[in-house]
Image (cartoon, grey):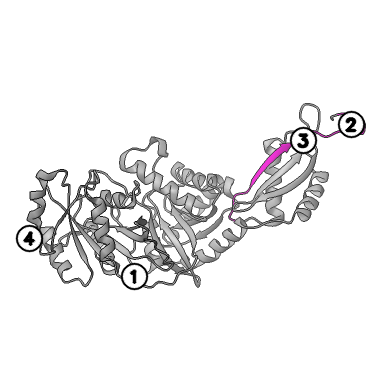
Amino acid sequence: MTDEHTGPLPVVAIVGRPNVGKSTLVNRFLGRRAAVVQDTPGVTRDRIAYEALWNGKRFTVVDTGGWDPQAEGLGASITRQAEYAMKTADVIVLVVDSQVGATETDLAAARVLRRSDRPVILVANKVDDERSEANAAELWSLGLGEPHAVSALHGRASGDLLDLVLDAMPEAPREQDEEGGPRRVALVGRPNVGKSSLINRLAKEERSVVDSVAGTTVDPVDSLVSLGGEEWRFVDTAGLRRKVNTASGMEYYASLRTEGAIQAAEVAVVLLAADEVISEQDQRVISQVVDAGRALVIAINKWDTLDEDRHYQLKREIERELSRVKWATRVNISAATGRGVSKLADHLRAALASWETRVPTAELNTFVRSLVQETPPPARGGRAPKIKYVTQADIRPPRFVVFSTGFLEAGYRRFLERKLREQFGFHGTPIEISVKVREGRDKDGKRG
């Protein structure tokens, strides 16, 4: 069976109360470890979409936070995310822990789902052997038909379950969204700077769970938003606390997801909190974006909350702490009130335009020759290197190769970068300059 459908994919929502193994089942569907899994209830808090493939059929799997109709506070926000996923899904998979049996929460979920016009598949998870199947049979009491016994952790009967999911899918997805090619934006920053609040402001709905507890977002969350008359795909990521190689457990996998989101993006918005000192964590996030070679916009959130003293201090901090990325475009915003948020689109477009800029070779060499005549490279070992030729090897980001008769000091390479930016712009993008040494020859053919 081959799926040649190129429009929007059917959506399968995986729902259930906390810690029944939803994310483990999602990973089993995907055939890889994509969703964050940990033995702590509530690790998944937002609805996260992944593309899956089974028997030649592509579809979208949506992992959701634990659903609890009686939840309050953060739990209520998670529940709303799960309920929204159910409303927009083509097939709903309700996961129940067979070892625990049907709880009051499971019964409440079943009452809601019995009224749904979507196909509902009941999964009795954690059935690791035949002896456990009797526990699964007790879930007939939920009134959702036959409970399908699986072990998401060990893969038992997962293939049969996927066959059932495919059989339950409609011929066409319910929601026919227009297919386009929205630019991919990673929204990154340390915990609790307002990333999820900004996503919700942009999406004009509660797309990401927002809570005053730092670290609410664990997985990257995709959102298609309309901004400045254009559609963009924003990915809200986990707040980065420490380097991946020093993180552990849930944070380790969240860091990997964030790193992956940056790599998959074209431009990153690094969100800083105006009411907090620019920290080492902020610097590390910016370094990740630069090292990945992605276009960069720095958005300073909570700008409207500052008094005059903090305005002055922040200005000094920016000059001092962000001096190495003076080229990054900056915008002051308030995710809470929406102030300045509309300006993001112009900054994103400008950064992407620079990221994709190619300078004609003739124009580039004319400029560099003139520059070198005015300021030649410093001598090294008693001999000054000569720059023979410069070419732009690539874009996204712009990469330049300098052919020289000798090594160019790091200071001179930084000088070249600064002058290239002054001449050709490159606002909002890192640029890379590498040197290839080719020894010159004098008139007698001897190497010089």
Label 4 element class: helix
Quadrant where the C terminus is found in the figure? top right
Mark 2 = which residue? 445
As measured in the structure, the alpha-carbon distance from the residue carrying label 1 to the one carrying label 4 is 30 Å
User: Toward which corner of the image does residue 320 lie, by quadrant?
Assistant: top right
> Marks 3 and 4: which is nearer the front?
4
Q: Amino acid at mark 3?
A: Arg
Q: Looking at the image, can residue 304 be seen?
A: yes
C-beta proximity under 8 Å, tags 4 and 2? no
As measured in the structure, the alpha-carbon distance from the residue carrying label 4 to the one carrying label 2 is 92 Å
Residue at the right extreme? 444
Mark 4 = which residue? 141
Q: Earlier in the sequence, mark 1 or mark 4?
A: 4
- Is-magenta flag for residue 336? no
The residue that appears at 37% across and 38% down in the rendered structure is 247
- Is-magenta flag for residue 444? yes
Mark 3 = which residue? 438
Q: Which residues are magenta?
A: 428-446
The residue that appears at 44% across and 72% down in the rendered structure is 178
Task: Determine which of the numbered discs, if any, sits on residue 173 in the image.
Answer: 1
Label 3 element class: loop
Magenta part, dominant SS = loop
* The one of 353 and 30 positioned closer to us in this rendering: 30
> Residue 39: where, in percent of width, then height?
23, 43
What is the total number of numbered labels drawn onto the structure image? Answer: 4
Q: Earlier in the sequence, mark 2 or mark 1?
A: 1
C-beta proximity under 8 Å, tags 3 and 1? no
As measured in the structure, the alpha-carbon distance from the residue carrying label 3 to the one carrying label 4 is 79 Å
Q: Earlier in the sequence, mark 3 or mark 4?
A: 4
Q: Is residue 262 left or right of residue 434?
A: left
